[in-house]
Amino acid sequence: MHRIDTDAHILEALDALVGIDPRLEAVRARAGEVPLRRTAPGFASLVSIIVSQQVSRASADAIEGRLVRLVNPLTPDAVLSGGEEPLIAAGLSRAKQRTVLALSCAIRDDGLDLEALCALDADQAIARLTALPGIGPWTAQVYLLVAAGHPDVFPAGDVALQAAVADALSLSERPNPRDLAMLAESWTPLRAVAARLFWAYYRERKGHEAAPLP
């Protein structure tokens, strides 16, 4: 599997995507710079994505900023030692508190290896991640995209991607996750770069960043 690890990989993949779907040439022209969007695999990266669930990028950045000040270093052991209090003070919802605590337990007690997950194929990795409480397909797919550099995942549940695709391709309405996932099949095997492209398009259209990381 060819990982997306460099800006050169992004440019190469964008050229290939335009070849696959000529409609994306205009999207690319409007989107401007398409960032690499990579983070180091591991606990801190996945927690950042959990924090980003269903909130704006600005809100997620603010919550994460408080969290890393209150739990330093941000590790499973430190989270479990601190318990719920610092998670509440950071502004995590009750559901996200449970998810972060469950993830910490899975790593400390059950041997979950988030770095090793990055070497699996997407379906296997997503199945293992979504078996954890509070981690759904969007969170697992974004983790593979930004932490593993997986080339062919598309978080169709992302509202900004739904809006960007509808606008860019002049769809009559915003696609639901199932319809967007089906539409994105045509961008295989580079769906992760297509997601980056539409996040960049959204940024240019709306004037603010919507991509969850980084």
Image (cartoon, rainbow, N blue to C red):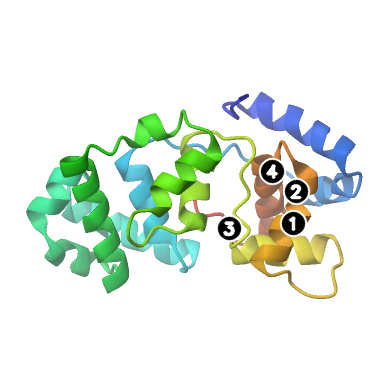
Tell us which disc is closer to us: 1 or 3.
1
Q: Mark 2: give few (<14), some (14-19) or many (20+) Cα within 10 Å.
A: some
Can residue 206 be seen here? The reply is no
**Circle 2 sits in a helix, a strand or a loop, which is it?**
helix
Tell us which disc is closer to us: 4 or 1.
1
The residue closer to the viewer here, 46 or 199, is 46
Q: Which residue is mark 2?
A: 185
**Circle 4 sits in a helix, a strand or a loop, which is it?**
helix
Q: Are marks 4 and 2 in contact (CB under 8 Å)?
A: yes
Give the mark nearer the N terminus: 4 vs 2: 2
The residue closer to the viewer here, 132 or 157, is 132
Can residue 49 be seen here? The reply is yes
Mark-to-mark CA distance, 4 and 1? 11 Å
Mark-to-mark CA distance, 1 and 2? 5 Å
The percent position of residue 203, horizontal first and vertical second, equals 66, 57
Q: Are marks 1 and 2 in contact (CB under 8 Å)?
A: yes
**In the displayed structure image, the side of residue 109 where residue 21 appears, left or right:** right
Q: Which residue is mark 4?
A: 191
Q: Which residue is mark 1?
A: 182
Determine which of the numbered discs, if any, sits on residue 209 in the image: 3
Give the mark nearer the N terminus: 3 vs 2: 2
Q: Mark 4: give few (<14), some (14-19) or many (20+) Cα within 10 Å.
A: many
Amino acid type at image mark 2: Glu
Give the mark nearer the N terminus: 1 vs 3: 1
